[in-house]
Amino acid sequence: MNIFAIADLHLSLGSDKPMDVFSGWDGYVEKLKDHWCSKVNEADIVVIAGDVSWGMSLEESLTDFEFIHSLPGQKYILKGNHDYWWTTAKKMNSFFEQHGLTSLHILHNNCVVCGGLALCGTRGWIFENGQPQDQKIVAREAQRLETSLKAAGDREKIVFLHYPPIYMKEMSVEIMEVLHHYQVKTCYYGHIHGGGRRFALNGTYMDIQFQLISCDQVDFDPVFVASTEMKEPAENMT
């Protein structure tokens, strides 16, 4: 089994929010499909690190979910800042089951166990506007990340976030502290697009390897994360 990751699909197949008006996003849905199908098998896992659909509700996002479901592999979805359709895990899982979207799963306050590996994550947050209320959000997201990492036990932990924990002069200190406490060595994140990508951290910082995996950063091509001999992943709920 191979594990891949990508972020910021920004699909709008069932809503009116085209992304091809932005430079580099022309024909991105077909490009994403072609890249995905060329490397991902049905037994593989793809972690989607937020900003999945522009739909304002689960129902409005259904066409986007159906497209993702049609692609090979099991998909584990994190919340992004533009995922307005996001609700409780119970409601989302029930919606997926109701519509036969059996390859879609939520990564939120839980982790996915794949043999000796554990896939962990949360949305994250960063002080983009420097507002005091951001501190409460960061603290909550750090707690969610810790809940996910605790569920991993002694397994090797790979973390996925939507927001970068470090960007230019800003840092989510609480999230970085959790990453260090649980000895995380690899962290993938999204959110950053366009010209802002040149300021994104792609490399090692404080002994953690960071990589930006937003769609336009990786040319709409899921990034290989790891391989495991385990054939059937088990979601470890907390």
Image: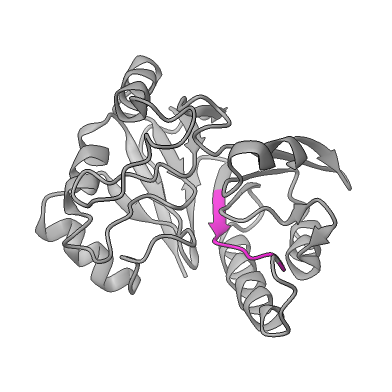
**Residue at the front extreme of this rendering:** 21
- Judge whether 207 appears above or below 179 on screen: above
Count the marks: 0
Q: What residue lies at 25% left-to-right and 63% top-to-bottom? A: 93
Residue 134: x, y in percent?
67, 78
Front residue of this view, candidates 124 and 224: 124
Kindly indicate the quadrant of the structure image that contains residue 147: bottom right
* In the image, residue 221 lies in the stretch drawn in magenta: no
- Judge whether 24 appears above or below 57 on screen: above
Front residue of this view, candidates 134 and 145: 134
Q: What residue lies at 28% left-to-right and 65% top-to-bottom? A: 56
Residue 182: x, y in percent?
75, 59
**Residue at the right extreme of this rendering:** 206
Q: What residue lies at 27% left-to-right and 39% top-to-bottom? A: 68
State which region is magenta.
119-127
Residue 91: x, y in percent?
24, 72
Query: What is the quadrant of the N terminus in the image?
Result: top left
> Which color mode does the image show?
one colour
- Report the side of 232 relative to 94 (left or right): right
Residue 90: x, y in percent?
28, 72
Front residue of this view, candidates 67 and 179: 67
Q: Is residue 201 visible?
A: no
Q: Is residue 130 visible?
A: yes
- Judge whether 142 appears above or below 114 on screen: below
- Report the side of 112 relative to 177 (left or right): left
